[in-house]
Image (tube, helix red, strand yellow):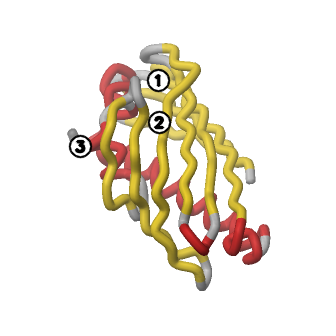
């Protein structure tokens, strides 16, 4: 599943960039995130609970940053295993550009699943993935604009 979106955040590029690197901000924005520890240099360990169609699972995985251009762009990659439910993995390339007094954030997401989750069908998985990405970036925008 591939998805590209953009949104304008009423916060400076520096503030938005610091949010992308902040474990507490990411934990608050990742839907279903129960725990997120680590740092941008070594990566983050996450525990996320999600329900996809009839399948509910606790995913344990990692989030890493790569292709980092400080203050401008990076690639967030994540992979998690949900036991019998299967696995999920994905990546988002995030680009920041000044836009007036705010920041234009553009993201390109690529996600995939395997195991029992893959048996749900691409329509359910694509819809769920789009919803999850939208929830994350909507929440990220809210957090950045209120802090």
At 26% from the left and 43% from the top, the residue drawn is 24
Considering every residue shown, the one lying at the far bottom of the view is: 54
Q: Nearer the viewer, residue 72 or 36?
A: 36
Left/right placement of residue 127 relative to residue 134 reads right
Q: Residues within 10 Å of mark 2 (few under 14, many from 20)?
A: some
Q: Using the rendered view, name the quadrant where residue 39 is placed.
A: top left
At 32% from the left and 61% from the top, the residue drawn is 34
Residue 87 at x, y percent in the picture: 62, 61
Q: Looking at the picture, does residue 81 appear above or below residue 106?
A: below
At 52% from the left and 19% from the top, the residue drawn is 68
Q: CA distance from mark 2 to mark 3?
A: 14 Å
Q: Using the rendered view, name the quadrant where residue 54 is placed.
A: bottom right
* Residue ID for mark 3: 146
> Contact (CB < 8 A) between labels 2 and 1?
yes
The numbered mark, 3 or 1, whose residue comes first in the sequence reads: 1
- Say what secondary structure mark 1 lies in: strand
The numbered mark, 2 or 3, whose residue comes first in the sequence reads: 2
* Mark seen at residue 99: 1
Q: Residues within 10 Å of mark 3 (few under 14, many from 20)?
A: few
Which mark is in front, 3 or 1? Answer: 3
Q: CA distance from mark 3 to mark 1?
A: 18 Å
Left/right placement of residue 64 relative to residue 128 reads left
* Residue ID for mark 2: 8
Q: Looking at the picture, does residue 111 appear above or below residue 128?
A: above
Q: Using the rendered view, name the quadrant where residue 37 is placed.
A: top left
């Amino acid at each position: 599943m591939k998805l590209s979106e953009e949104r304008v955040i009423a916060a400076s590029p520096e503030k938005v960039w610091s949010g992308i690197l902040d474990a507490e901000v990411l934990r608050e924005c990742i839907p279903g995130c129960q725990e997120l520890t680590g740092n941008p240099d070594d990566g983050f360990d996450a525990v996320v609970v999600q329900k996809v169609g009839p399948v509910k699972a606790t995913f344990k995985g990692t989030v890493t940053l790569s292709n980092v251009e400080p203050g401008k762009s990076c690639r967030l990659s994540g992979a998690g295993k949900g036991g019998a439910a299967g696995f999920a993995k994905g990546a988002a390339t995030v680009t920041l550009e000044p836009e007036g007094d705010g920041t234009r954030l553009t993201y390109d997401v690529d996600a995939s699943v395997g195991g029992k989750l893959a048996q749900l069908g691409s329509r359910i998985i694509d819809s769920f993935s789009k919803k999850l990405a939208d929830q994350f970036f909507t929440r990220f925008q809210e957090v950045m604009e209120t802090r």
